[in-house]
Image (spheres, rainbow, N blue to C red):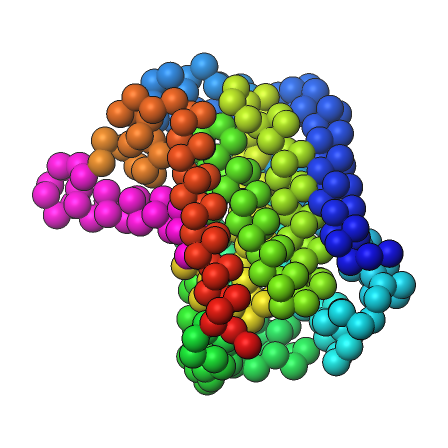
Amino acid sequence: MAFGIWTFLSAFVSLIISAVLGRFLIPYLHKLNFGQTILDIGPSWHKNKQGTPVMGGIMFIVAITVTTTVSVILYHIFGNSVITIYQENPDRSLAFIFAGLGLALCNGVIGFIDDFTKVVKKRNLGLTAIQKLVLQFAVAIAFLVILSLIGYGTSTTIPFIGKVDLGWLYYVIAAIVIVGVVNAVNLTDGVDGLDGSLTFFVSLFFMLIASHLSNVGVTFMSAAVAGGCLGFLVWNFHPAKVFMGDTGSLFLGGIVCALAFAIDMPILLLPMGIVYLCEMGSVVLQVSYFKLTHGKRLFKMSPIHHHFEMCGWSEVKIVAVFSAVAVLFGIVSFALVYFGVK
């Protein structure tokens, strides 16, 4: 079967699984009374979202995990070996894909514990920030240890520069980058359809980049992520019938990191994840400015999507504009790889 058709099937099957799961998961979450508790400090109009089922990220987590696993293994066995990355070391390449899935799934488990604690206690406070960070760093370190054990070194590819060996510093920077991006994606989840839409476009460009690099495993995984997000948006686009919760947003943060590391270019998280990083940056700036000025605010509300809400932007407009920015920087990222990596 042609590589392109296989990639399309990965995306399509993931989309169908994610969308169909929503038909059964949402009523079940309603039955369990697993509804979102809305913070009083948020936009007042968000109060009408009180009780909307959370943990909907389970839909795309199942879809992405199943589709990636099946498509990668089947292609490894039956696919066209001429174009596959598995020519040099098939076992190591497969191990990298599953290590990446493990990174995402473990972060999803952290999110699930956080969500479950919230719904059981009926409040918008689950794990503490310190508890989350400790668990996230433990997962990031485990991921990096696995990469080391399966033969990946301390070098990384930078467009127009080439391979750069960072030595032991690679592991320190990589762990901080992973935890930072995971939390940035988590902070982006605050408007109907925003996180799912952004990650759809980010994974789409990772798919194009991986295909250009003939990295079959990452191409399939990216396609599965894009399809899973699109299937979830059937239920999550405004007005949302379900929220992904920390279960979903932490998983997506992990999978985005996995895709960047799998093509040996975590540097691409800067342009590809520009919106995520701006969301996190707005929180850091808001808190810092508030403390320095003893109570003044730089933005009307943070993360920055809430600032635009307070300025009168609709949730649909925010998703559209932020997604357009993601597409623009996705094009920039593809150009960096196309012209800058040989």
Which quadrant of the structure image shows residue 161?
bottom left
Q: Position of residue 170 (x, y in %)?
A: 46, 77
Residue at the location (50% across, 42% down)?
A: 198
Magenta segment: does it hold 66? no
Whether residue 196 is situated above or below residue 191 in the rendered picture: below
Q: In this rendering, does residue 329 appear at all?
A: yes
For the C terminus, the quadrant is bottom right
Quick check: 335 left or right of 223?
left
Q: Residue 145 falls in which quadrant of the image?
A: bottom right
- Magenta run includes residue 286: yes
In the rendered image of this protein, does residue 318 appear above or below residue 45? below
Quadrant in which the N terminus appears: bottom right
Q: Nearer the viewer, residue 29 or 224?
A: 224
Is 167 situated above or below 47?
below
Q: Is residue 85 left or right of residue 41?
A: right
What residue sits 59% from the left and 49% below the top? 204
The location of residue 178, given as percent across then percent down, is 48, 61
- Considering every residue shown, the one lying at the far left of the view is 293
Residue 53, position as x, y percentages in the image: 59, 24
Span highlighted in magenta in the image: 271-298
- The answer to which quarter of the image holds residue 43 is top left
Give the percent coordinates (x, y) of residue 57.
62, 37
> Is residue 187 visible to the viewer in this orientation of the structure?
no
Horizontal side of 75 relative to 26 (left or right) equals right
- Residue furthest to the right: 78
